[in-house]
């Protein structure tokens, strides 16, 4: 899960009374599951009995390193587990995603449901990853983001198998690569643009994070740039007075932070990484700046991106005017290193309503949020998509002391809500979406 949660709201007040009234009158709403209650109870009972194995697998997955662009070992492990669970057509695509199908009763070629979690973590190669336990708390880098999601996929398939669950739509289980950082959603992009199932995807659920009440239905888009300012360079004393790439970079940052952005929709920017220079007594010949810009509104994101690129040109022009160019001018290279699309799944869509109703039935207060996840790609393409959490909560995502609460009852309740949501989502009709 890339980035913090950027926006939240509770389920619309007008929608809750409608759902309660409909339930009382036994109306056939899209949020109702076609799987009978006995089947649902059997599947959640299977989950509860599987608690120890779930925790053991969570530890195993977490301790398989999966740094950015090096997810292969974890992918191979997931591939073997998918096959062991009897899923069909278990494959690794050319981008590195692991895919496997659980067949439904719908005719071949009918739209399918994708249930996904990501393989990669934010932690670089060489990071020590060892799960420690203190009572009901497990700690390790990446344990919640997204080892927990991968663990949930396996636990749900086992529970379905144990309970003998049948469902309407095929469910395509996917472990994706490249969700974090400069991975730039490369795995899920491939699934929707080149993957063998791209024409059959009716809906998409990403499992990412440890808060089971969270439903991400708005995709926060982002634009990320590495901007490199170049100049002639020289001795800090002997060449004093010539143009300095560092000064141009600093001016660009100052101008960026004078830009006003809307609070609603929440739109943000961050000057995040600076690199370059040769020594303390040398005017640098190259300085690089990395900038992150985000918004759930495509028009606001485009406006901010255009303003930033203009600011960079203005800073270069100002530096070339302010100091000597006798040995050469400041130039700039602008490289886009990240481009995550924005989008949304409307709150009235059956997939969102199903998620809300399911979480409420398990005692959760659903939180509709905006964030940047694998679901961005589906939402931007107009395909119904949400991202959900699971388990019993946790914290410190993207930190080496990341943790999860695995208290048995709460953990199984969160895991069960996700499983029933998946089963109900697999019964919805996506053919006309």
Image (cartoon, rainbow, N blue to C red):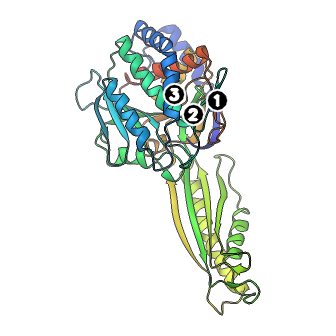
Residue 394 tag number: 1
Asked if residue 247 lies left or right of residue 19, the reply is right
Q: Residue at x 44, y 16 (%)?
A: 32
Callout 1: SS? strand
- Per the model, the C-alpha gap separating discs 2 and 1 is 9 Å
> Of residues 128 and 144, which is closer to you in this image?
128
Tag 2 and tag 1, C-beta contact below 8 Å:
yes
Q: Residue at x 53, y 49 (%)?
A: 125
Asked if residue 326 lies left or right of residue 353, the reply is right
Tag 2 and tag 3, C-beta contact below 8 Å:
yes
- Rate crowding at label 2 as few (under 14), some (14 to 19) or many (20 or more) other CA atoms within 10 Å: many
Callout 2: SS? helix
Image quadrant occupied by the C terminus? top left
* Mark closer to the chain start, 2 or 3: 3
Q: Is residue 387 visible?
A: no
Q: How many marks?
A: 3
Give the answer, above or below, for where 206 lies relative to 269.
above
Asked if residue 166 lies left or right of residue 412, the reply is left
- Per the model, the C-alpha gap separating discs 2 and 3 is 8 Å
Image quadrant occupied by the N terminus? top right
Q: Position of residue 107 (x, y in %)?
A: 23, 25
- Per the model, the C-alpha gap separating discs 3 and 1 is 14 Å
Residue 143 tag number: 2
Q: Position of residue 26 (x, y in %)?
A: 47, 9
Q: Which residue is mark 3?
A: 58
Q: Is residue 354 visible?
A: yes
Q: Position of residue 96 (x, y in %)?
A: 37, 45
């Amino acid at each position: 899960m890339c980035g913090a949660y950027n926006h939240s709201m509770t389920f619309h007040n007008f929608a809750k009374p409608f759902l309660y009234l409909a339930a009382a009158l036994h109306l056939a709403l899209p949020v109702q599951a076609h799987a009978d209650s006995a089947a649902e109870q059997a599947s959640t009972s299977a989950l509860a009995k599987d608690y120890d194995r779930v925790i053991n697998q969570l530890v195993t997955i977490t301790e398989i390193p999966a740094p950015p662009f090096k997810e292969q070992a974890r992918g191979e492990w997931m591939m073997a587990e998918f096959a062991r669970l009897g899923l069909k057509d278990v494959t690794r695509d050319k981008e590195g995603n692991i895919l496997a199908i659980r067949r439904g009763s719908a005719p071949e070629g009918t739209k399918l449901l994708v249930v996904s979690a990501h393989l990669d973590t934010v932690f670089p190669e060489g990071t020590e990853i060892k799960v420690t336990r203190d009572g009901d708390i497990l700690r390790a880098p990446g344990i919640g983001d997204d080892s927990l999601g991968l663990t949930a996929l396996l636990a749900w398939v086992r529970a379905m198998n144990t309970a003998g669950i049948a469902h309407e739509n095929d469910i395509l289980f996917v472990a994706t690569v490249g969700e974090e950082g400069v991975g730039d959603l490369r795995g899920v992009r491939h699934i929707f643009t080149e993957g063998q199932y791209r024409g059959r995807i009716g809906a998409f659920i990403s499992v990412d994070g440890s808060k089971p009440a969270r439903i991400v239905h708005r995709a926060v888009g982002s634009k990320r740039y590495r901007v490199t300012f170049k100049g002639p360079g020289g001795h800090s004393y002997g060449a004093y007075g010539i143009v300095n790439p560092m000064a141009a970079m600093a001016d660009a940052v100052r101008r960026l932070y004078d830009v006003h952005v809307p609070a609603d929709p929440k739109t943000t920017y961050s000057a995040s990484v600076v690199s370059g220079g040769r020594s303390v007594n040398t005017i640098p010949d190259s300085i690089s700046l990395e900038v992150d810009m985000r918004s759930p509104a495509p028009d606001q994101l485009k406006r901010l991106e255009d303003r930033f690129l203009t600011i960079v040109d203005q800073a270069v022009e100002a530096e070339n005017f302010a100091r000597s160019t006798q040995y050469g001018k400041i130039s700039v290279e602008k490289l886009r290193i990240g481009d995550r699309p924005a989008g949304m799944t409307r709150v009235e869509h059956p997939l969102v309503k199903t998620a809300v109703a399911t979480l409420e039935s398990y005692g959760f207060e659903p939180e509709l949020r905006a964030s940047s996840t694998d679901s961005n790609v589906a939402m931007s393409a107009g395909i119904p998509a949400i991202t959900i959490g699971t388990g019993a909560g946790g914290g410190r995502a993207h930190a080496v002391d990341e943790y999860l609460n695995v208290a048995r009852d709460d953990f199984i309740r969160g895991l069960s809500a996700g499983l029933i949501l998946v089963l109900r989502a697999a019964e919805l009709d996506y053919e006309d979406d």
